[in-house]
Image (cartoon, rainbow, N blue to C red):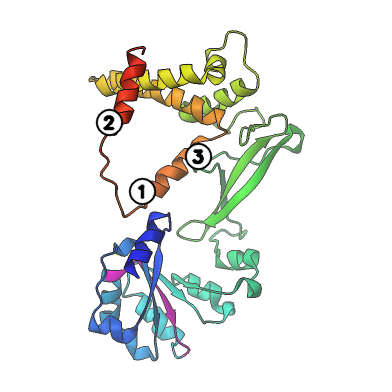
Amino acid sequence: MLDEAVTWLDHGAVHIVLQTTFQELVAGIASDLPPSRVYLSVSLTDNEQLVASTAAVLRTLSSGVFLSGAAISSSSLVQFRKFLPESYRVLLTDSPLDLLATYHHQHIDLVGSPSALDAGQAFAQCLRSDRPDGLFATVVADLSGVPHAYVPRDSSGHVQELVRLDMDCDSDAIRCLVLQHDATSSAPDTGAFCHLNTRTCWGHASGIRELQSTLQERLVSAPAGSYTKRLFDDRTLLRNKLVEEAQELAEAEHPTHVAEEAADVLYFAMVRAVAANVTFHDVETQLTMRARKLSRRPGNAKTYRIEAAAAILNGE
């Protein structure tokens, strides 16, 4: 079972749920999996099992637990929750959904069937406001979490595609993650957000986001003599420049020189990505997925790749 769990985690699962019993938990179970990636599923038969010693065992094995058992009382569960850190997730699987808001504010989540749940209503029930008008602080951001600010005017021709809606740790603020589309551009997520026709209400994008936007524009319509356009059209040139700049980065010593060469590598890498309709967010997603892997390859250099690169650098 643990081998299968590792496979799931290697493929990007944030957590794996392992089913056990209270008796097995008390007797002692071993797991080679990191607790931060494990949730346990435990069925309880009475409130006397909701004690500090049970919580201590759960903390050593997991970062969350699914609890089930019709005999569990709400008062015992709330008291039990206090034995666990706030970062530890507690989920109740067979409780009436009308207790959703009450339990949520005690840092206890309920698991319900989608057919019996209005997602929007459930989300709203878990929010709370300390404002006299009952409103909630709201931020709109791109998929990397960079805030934009306000919703653009209808006359701009730009459209926001809502990808995700979530709340902060105190349940008193809402975050909307969006893709910002320009009706006049075929490139995804390139629209302006501000009425001043900038990416955000704090001015133009900078760094890697500015680079990506510029490259997307060059791919569609490049000015005469554009070097970027030349790279788009000549895959061999692009390949050779990637190899050349990677070597220069490897040989750089001074911090400023390293930063300069890294910037060159990023430029050519993003040209290749944009040519394949890949965004920097796609790259970030792959980095996140790789960070979740438990199994690691040796990471040794590939001789045939080194030889191929040497041939390119030597003009062979």
In the figure, residue 160 lies in which quadrant?
top right
In the figure, residue 198 lies in which quadrant?
top right
Going from the N terminus, do you reach mark 1 or mark 2 first?
1
Task: Provide the residue designation for mark 2.
Answer: 303
Q: Nearer the viewer, mark 3 or mark 2?
A: 2
Q: Quadrant of the C terminus?
A: top left
Going from the N terminus, do you reach mark 3 or mark 2 first?
3
Q: Is residue 69 magenta?
A: yes
Residue ID at (68%, 38%)? 152
Q: Is residue 306 above or below residue 144?
A: above
Q: Position of residue 256 (x, y in %)?
A: 29, 19
At numbered mark 2, what does the secondary structure look like: helix, strand or loop? Answer: helix
Q: Is residue 104 left or right of residue 252?
A: right
Q: Type of residue at label 3?
A: His
Q: Decide: marks 1, 2 in contact (CB < 8 A)? A: no
Q: Is residue 56 left or right of residue 4?
A: left
Callout 2 environment at 10 Å: few (<14), some (14 to 19), or many (20+)? few
Alpha carbon distance from label 1 to label 3 = 15 Å
Span highlighted in magenta in the image: 61-70
Callout 3 environment at 10 Å: few (<14), some (14 to 19), or many (20+)? few
Callout 1 environment at 10 Å: few (<14), some (14 to 19), or many (20+)? few
Task: Provide the residue designation for mark 3.
Answer: 281
Q: Is residue 70 above or below residue 288?
A: below
The tag on residue 291 is 1
